[in-house]
């Protein structure tokens, strides 16, 4: 029997009730509302083109591909300077990532709910969540006024690595086999013994992968925040984006950075394939010794690499140039945080209008990212494309993903009058490549048998992709989109330095008299980011 109310309908039979579904007219109303919201968002963001914007864009592309070999930032050969500044980025990112990983391992071991009491676990979890809810811009101000040069960069990177890797490592520990944990407890083993002897070895591969991805991500962040004092190759990239003429100096440092990140991604792929992920062998008396030797060699090589990483990081600590910490400035920052000048809110700008515009920009970004990711996946998935085509498409997608967001902005931004419009496009492009990369891993696990049967029925690749492949990864797609909401809240705040949003611009120190004028917006940002975290948790539990 069909039952319905104003908004939904469902089936009841033999005391069984199916899931409720929206009635057709409700779906139509929702679609119309979403489209009207898109139109309003386009109007508020302002997508009008700049005078001669397309001409300036084409000229910027021409200047990029007519590189100068001599730098105007520091006298010298631009290629050699790029290598020198890249080394600084590699060094500070490497040290910061290793230090952050050590902190994350420690707090994950004492903060996961599997091997600790609930009160301790929840206290640590809430504390880390609170720290993660601060916008990156606040930590940038905090560390750049509290320390100098390379030390400030290392402290910042280690902090970001810690608060993000803690979450992933804790979840990895908690998601290990519960049956294994119960069995060990029945044997009378302590929680510490279980953690070190059974749980951590189970997730060591995940920890290595988390650390590698964190290093790559941190390297890109150093390129973005060079404007606020982070040292490294980002300083050359930022200088080359000061005006149209300076774009002649962009290609060489950008090429050096992209080449290194590409080599890093290839190395990560090699490590995962040959050292991290175990291969399945059919063991018999003939190959037992050979397989055992391979396993010993593989394990030994992996541990040698891990030990070498920590030794190198320790040695590099002694190469930091003239490290200084300014405790007075640190204390002042915390005073401003705890005593914000709330009167600044609404003094010049309406906070509700600013938040509405921020929401509309994020909404537009996620919608555009969703559409671009759909197109990207159509060309990059391995189920409906031949091996050469999807590898080529993935190379293009990876190349776009590697390019620092700020570089894309300084070229695409010439087209639009409003910088916020350019950032919507840039963030959507970058988000789509990230979503596609993640979803291609999910698509890889789809059974080839059903795809083959659909092809035998003469279904074309468009139908197979839209009616079978995408519905199969719909839940993962939804989760990734919610993740992008949080990421883009942070993006529009962090890039306020370049007028990505009026709310982000309000948090720029250059626009204010003191840091106490910024901290009210920091607290509002914390509320926004925590709300997005709650939304993500709800989506994960109900997907």
Image (spheres, rainbow, N blue to C red):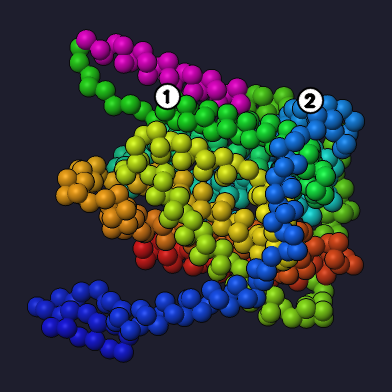
Q: Quadrant of the C terminus?
A: bottom left
Q: Quadrant of the N terminus?
A: bottom left
Magenta region, residue range = 286-309
Depth order, front residue of 130/135: 135
Residue 415 % position (x, y): 69, 59
Does residue 484 sit above or below 91 in this rendering?
below
Q: Residue furthest left?
A: 14
Say whether disc 2 or disc 1 marks the residue closer to the N-terminus. 2
Depth order, front residue of 122/140: 140
Does residue 539 sit above or below 54 in this rendering?
below
Does residue 341 sit above or below 243 in this rendering?
below
Residue 372 % position (x, y): 49, 56
Residue 167: numbered disc = none
Residue 274: numbered disc = 1
Circle 2 — which element? helix
Residue, disc 2: 80
Residue 182 % position (x, y): 31, 46
Q: Secondary structure of the magenta portion, mostly?
A: helix
CA separation in Å, label 2 and label 1: 34 Å
Task: Point out the frontmost of discs 2 and 1.
Answer: 2
Q: Residue at position x 46%, y 63% from top?
A: 537
Depth order, front residue of 57/207: 57
> For the residue carrying disc 1, how many other residues have a C-alpha within 10 Å: few (<14), some (14-19), or many (20+)?
few
- From the viewer's perspective, tell me whether residue 69 is left or right of residue 57: right
> For the residue carrying disc 2, how many other residues have a C-alpha within 10 Å: few (<14), some (14-19), or many (20+)?
some
Residue 14 in which image quadrant: bottom left
Magenta includes 489? Answer: no
Does residue 325 sit above or below 260 in this rendering?
below
């Amino acid at each position: 029997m069909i039952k319905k109310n104003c908004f939904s309908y469902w089936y009841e039979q033999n005391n069984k009730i199916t899931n409720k579904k929206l009635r057709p007219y409700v779906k139509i109303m929702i679609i119309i509302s979403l489209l009207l919201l898109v139109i309003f968002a386009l109007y508020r963001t302002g997508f009008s083109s700049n005078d001669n914007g397309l001409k300036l864009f084409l000229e910027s592309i021409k200047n990029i591909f007519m590189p100068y070999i001599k730098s105007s930032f520091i006298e010298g050969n631009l290629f050699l300077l790029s290598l020198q500044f890249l080394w600084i980025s590699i060094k500070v990112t490497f040290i910061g990532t290793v230090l952050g990983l050590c902190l994350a391992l420690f707090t994950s071991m004492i903060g996961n709910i599997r091997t600790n009491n609930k009160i301790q676990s929840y206290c640590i979890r809430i504390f880390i969540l609170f720290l993660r809810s601060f916008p990156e811009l606040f930590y940038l101000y905090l560390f750049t006024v509290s320390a100098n040069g390379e030390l400030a960069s290392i402290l910042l990177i280690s902090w970001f690595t810690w608060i993000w890797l803690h979450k992933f490592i804790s979840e990895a520990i908690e998601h290990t086999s519960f049956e294994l944990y119960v069995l060990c407890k029945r044997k009378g083993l302590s929680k510490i013994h279980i953690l070190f002897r059974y749980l951590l070895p189970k997730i060591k591969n995940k920890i290595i992968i988390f650390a590698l991805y964190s290093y790559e991500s941190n390297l890109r962040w150093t390129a973005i925040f060079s404007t606020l004092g982070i040292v490294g190759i980002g300083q050359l990239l930022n200088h080359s984006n000061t005006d149209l003429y300076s774009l002649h100096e962009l290609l060489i440092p950008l090429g050096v950075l992209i080449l290194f990140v590409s080599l890093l991604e290839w190395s990560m792929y090699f490590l995962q394939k040959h050292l991290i992920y175990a291969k399945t062998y059919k063991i018999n008396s003939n190959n037992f010794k050979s397989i055992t030797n391979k396993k010993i060699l593989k394990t030994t090589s992996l541990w040698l690499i891990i030990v070498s990483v920590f030794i190198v990081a320790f040695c590099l600590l002694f190469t930091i140039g003239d490290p200084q910490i300014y405790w007075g400035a640190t204390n002042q920052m915390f005073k401003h945080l705890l005593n914000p000048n709330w009167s600044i809110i609404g003094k010049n700008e309406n906070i509700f209008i600013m938040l509405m515009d921020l929401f509309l920009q994020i909404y537009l970004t996620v919608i555009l990212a969703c559409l671009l990711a759909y197109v990207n996946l159509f060309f990059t998935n391995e189920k409906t494309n031949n091996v050469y085509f999807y590898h080529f498409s993935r190379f293009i997608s990876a190349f776009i993903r590697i390019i620092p967001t700020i570089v894309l902005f300084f070229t695409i931004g010439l087209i639009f009058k409003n910088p916020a419009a350019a950032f919507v496009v840039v963030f959507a492009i970058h988000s789509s490549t990230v979503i596609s990369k993640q979803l291609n891993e999910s698509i890889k696990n789809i059974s080839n048998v059903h795809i083959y049967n659909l092809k035998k029925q003469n279904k074309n690749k468009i139908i197979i992709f839209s009616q079978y492949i995408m519905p199969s990864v719909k839940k993962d797609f939804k989760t990734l989109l919610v993740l992008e909401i949080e990421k883009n809240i942070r993006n529009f705040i962090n890039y306020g330095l370049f007028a990505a949003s009026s709310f982000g611009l309000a948090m720029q120190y250059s626009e204010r008299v003191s840091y106490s004028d910024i901290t009210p917006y920091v607290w509002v940002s914390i509320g926004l980011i925590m709300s997005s975290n709650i939304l993500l948790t709800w989506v994960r539990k109900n997907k």
